Amino acid sequence: MLDRPPATPLRTAYDPRYDPLTDAGPGRSRDYAPTYWIGTAGPAPEDDGPVTADMSVEVAVIGSGYTGLSTAIHLARDHGIEVAVLEANAVAWGCSTRNGGQAQISAGRLKRSEWIARYGLDAAKRLHAEIVEAFEVFNDLIGSDEIDCDPQPGGHFYIAHRAKVMPKLEAEAALLREVFGYGARLMSREELHARHVKDQEAHGAMWEPDGTSIHAAKLAFSYIRLARRLGAKVHPSSPVEGWTTKGGYHYLHTPGGTVRARRVAIATAGYTPPGLDRRTRHRLMPVLSNSIVTRVLTDEERAACGFRTGSPLTDTRTLRHYYRYLPDGRVQIGSRSAITGRDAENPKHLELLKKGLYRKFPTLTGIALDYSWWGWVDVSHDMMPRITEAEPGTGIFYAMGYGGNGVMYSAQAGRRMAQLIAGMQLPELPIFGTALPHHGPLTPFRRLGQRMLYPWYQLRDETL
């Protein structure tokens, strides 16, 4: 008789009010958010069932999203290291099935000019080289026969929502070309409308050669299949509810048993429980982003919107809109949402997003929506990610803080975290080897600050 993985417990209902800043944890066996990606990806792949007894493993990865799965893939494939991935709910339950499916040549929230101002020119150039390499790693993964994610390449369009932004875009494009040797260029409203998309807000755009849209859940599901084929184990419904360390081993306590591991990789991003480990507590500011997908457009609607690309589109607002034309003829658009999970269902946030869609594409005013959801983005306090050992010699590593740009960079982040775990030295970069910053005494007031900043951002973006 063949051995079969233990049955996963029946899923509990999706909780739309879940809030990683205030809830003790993400729950157990919770169902997916009702995203377009889950609705169109087909059945979730096979996994190894929940942890049902005490077990030992060389490396335990907490979180089965893009970063955790990339870590498992690279540990198994490149280093031959035994690895088990622990997931509290359904596989790839968090960011990886709730994002906009946009891969851009960025990580974190800062532009290249801001890198120079913060780190200096030499470090900024090395950071750029890291991001270029990351896109190559991502392309190699999604270009393999084992990854099926409906890629739509064609570059990234950074679209000026007001005329006053064009000089800044022109300066950034020139910096990318002249300092970093990267082929970004500016295009006029007329060229954008004639060749790519008729966004009625657009006053022009900066185009970056590297940008690919993907199907978020299909990518995550493909990562799971690849990780398991390489020998990694993926255990859903296995939240880490306690953690002790003794004699050089970490003991991760789950409802079904304790997992003993020499090293632990944390890849929980915006869904990091506050009590998981003191070294990740208050290191991120989880920020809600909501997203909608329309019904399939008619030929007339598509022509009026001028969609000639499925590439990632992003506008220049601080609370930016990210949007795209999907392969099946729908339109997806997302932006920032409520401050708290308790307010996430408030219809005013959906109305604001719909108005954003209508401004860009007036012909879609009142169009029926097939999907609406939201999810948490892992924004670090200095707007840049970290891939590091939490403290030297602890055997605890983490990779997070992408600020909404993790679809692409998570592949490289997982690879880099696997290299750290394997004892390799990473390049000298400000995102490696240093901890995510803490907000210290301001921690209890972060959401108060967020409530004050959002109206200011809107005033600055739309009026001043």
Image (spheres, rainbow, N blue to C red):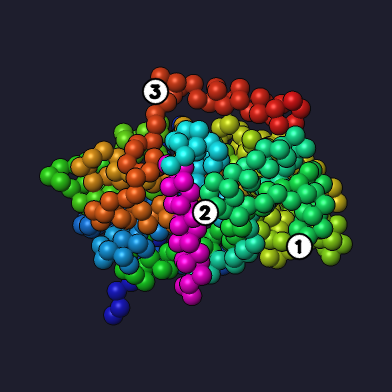
x and y percentages locating residue 235 in the rendered image: 35, 58
- Is the residue 420 above or below the residue 341 in the image? below
Mark 3 belongs to which amino acid?
Answer: Gly
Q: Which mark is residue 440?
A: 3
Q: CA distance from mark 3 to mark 1?
A: 48 Å
Q: CA distance from mark 3 to mark 2?
A: 29 Å
**At 41% across and 52% down in the image, what residue appears?**
413
Q: Which mark is residue 308?
A: 1
**At 58% across and 31% down in the image, what residue appears?**
339
- Is the residue 339 above or below the residue 124 in the image? above
Q: Is residue 95 visible?
A: no
Label 1 element class = loop
Q: Residues within 10 Å of mark 1 (few under 14, many from 20)?
A: some
Mark 2 belongs to which amino acid?
Answer: Val
Left or right of 382? Residue 257 is: left
Q: Can you say which quadrant of the picture contains the N terminus? A: bottom left
Mark 1 belongs to which amino acid?
Answer: Arg
x and y percentages locating residue 299 in the rendered image: 84, 65
Highlighted magenta segment, given as a residue range = 123-146
x and y percentages locating residue 305 in the rendered image: 81, 55
Q: Which mark is residue 407?
A: 2
**Earlier residue among tags 3 and 1:** 1
Label 2 element class = helix
**At 50% across and 33% down in the image, what residue appears?**
117
Q: Which mark is residue 178?
A: none
Q: Main secondary structure of the magenta part?
A: helix
Work out whether residue 105 or residue 326 is closer to the camera in this orientation and state it.
105
Q: Is residue 142 magenta?
A: yes
Left or right of 432? Residue 108 is: right
Q: CA distance from mark 2 to mark 1?
A: 23 Å
